Image (cartoon, rainbow, N blue to C red):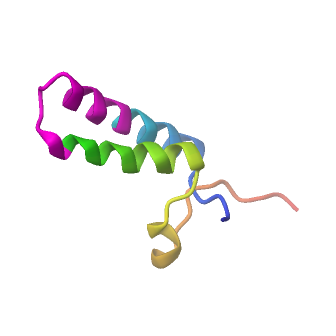
Amino acid sequence: MKTNAGNFDRIARALLGIVLIALTLTGTIGAWGWIGIVPLATGLTRFCPLYPMLGMSTCPMEKK
């Protein structure tokens, strides 16, 4: 699994996931908030499975 999520993307995904899960736990939003597990997982692993299908990557270019 090659890393394809840059630092800003990774942090934004993790924060979004945490916020959705917290809102679900407090009862502010319904059970659909558990979908926050997906952005949290992609933020922690630095890999988004959708990016390779779209030919995208937000990682900075590697210097040779």
Which secondary structure type mostly characterizes the magenta part of the structure? helix
**Which residue corresponds to the image point at 29% horizontal and 33% vertical from the top-left?**
21
29 or 14, nearer to the observer: 29
Picture coordinates of residue 38 (x, y %)?
38, 51
Q: Which residues are magenta?
A: 17-32
Percent position of residue 50, x then y:
44, 68
Q: Position of residue 7 (x, y in %)?
A: 58, 42
> Which residue is rendered at x = 49% and y = 68% of the image?
51
Of residues 10 and 28, the one drawn nearer to the viewer in this rendering: 28
Magenta stretch contains residue 53: no
Q: Is residue 54 above or below residue 57?
A: below
Residue 8 spot, x, y in % from top left: 52, 41
Q: Identify the residue at image location x=27%, y=35%.
A: 20
Q: Nearer the viewer, residue 14 or 63?
A: 14
Left/right placement of residue 49 relative to residue 23 reads: right
User: Which quadrant of the figure contains the C terminus?
Assistant: bottom right
Whether residue 52 is situated above or below residue 11 in the rendered picture: below
Using residue 41 as the reference point, say whether residue 33 is left or right of it.
left
Judged from this view, the residue extending furthest toward the top is 26
Q: Residue at 32% x, 43% y: name it.
A: 36
Tally of marks: 0
Which residue reaches farthest right?
64
Quadrant in which the N terminus is drawn: bottom right
Q: Verify whether residue 19 appears in magenta.
A: yes
Vertical side of 56 occupied by 59: above or below: above
